[in-house]
Amino acid sequence: MSPSHRDHRSRGTIGTAMLAGACCVGAIAYGVVVGPSMMPPQDVQATTAMTPDAGPAVPEPEPEEVAEPGPVGYLQIQLSDRDRAWVQTLRCTGVVEEDPATCADLALAAVEFQGRTEGAEGSEEEPEEALAGIEAEPTTAADPGGEQLFTEVGEGTVCTDKVYGQEEATVVGTWEGQEVETTLTRKGSCEEARWQRLRALTDQIG
């Protein structure tokens, strides 16, 4: 073999080796540059793992309405009608759902009566005397929940003498912190107005 032929083969082997080395270097560089871009970002994976699936919004419960307390009191009512007499009692604890309906009826009567007496201030006609259709001086009391509900006819009030019935009732006890001791009759227009206002007590208490 001639020297020129051996030199040619040596250069061919070296060139092949350099080309193979260049391909390896290129493959490594490609893997370094392009490889990370083909993998999912670590931040996204962590965020996805830590974020729960978003579900429908749960509405907050509406606050429950608190019921207004009812009246509190204990009353003993002694009734008579000609040759009949009987006694009934009423106990109101302030719990509307558990108390007899009479308790709520009396509370409503107290509110209505208070509104009538306040509306009658400065007028010549007492609302309770509308039954008789005559002029009268209004009567008032300090406490609408206690004394005012059981207000007796004021001295000097003008009333008719008509008798509306023979029934009578004596009411004793406490109502909204006030002592109560009064008598109800149906003799005269003013007393009849009181009787009707407190009809819940004189009717049979269930």
Image (cartoon, rainbow, N blue to C red):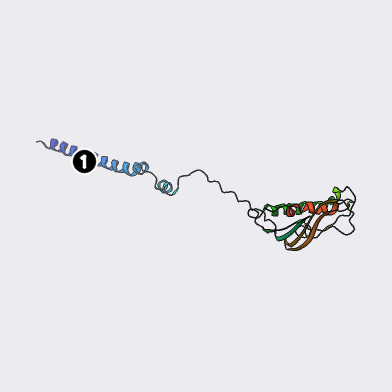
Residue 91 in picture, x, y percent from top left: 68, 59
Q: In this view, does 47 lie above or below 16?
A: below
Taking the view exactly as shown, the residue that stands out farthest to the left is: 1
The front one of 147 and 201 is: 201
Disc 1 secondary structure class: helix
Q: In this view, does 97 lie to the left or right of 166?
A: left
The front one of 9 and 199 is: 199
Residue 3 in picture, x, y percent from top left: 12, 37
Binning the other alpha carbons within 10 Å of mark 1 as few (below 14), some (14 to 19) or many (20 upward) gives few
Q: Is residue 95 left or right of residue 161?
A: left
The front one of 141 and 199 is: 199
Q: Is residue 126 above or below residue 3?
A: below
Look at the image and tell me in which quarter the N terminus lies.
Answer: top left
* Residue occupying image coordinates x 40% and y 46%: 45
The front one of 64 and 89 is: 89
Image mark count = 1
Residue 64 in picture, x, y percent from top left: 61, 51
Residue 33 appears in the picture as rendered: yes
Provide the residue designation for mark 1. Answer: 17
* Residue occupying image coordinates x 16% and y 39%: 10
Residue 120 appears in the picture as rendered: no
Residue 96 in picture, x, y percent from top left: 65, 54
Q: Which amino acid does label 1 sit on?
A: Ala
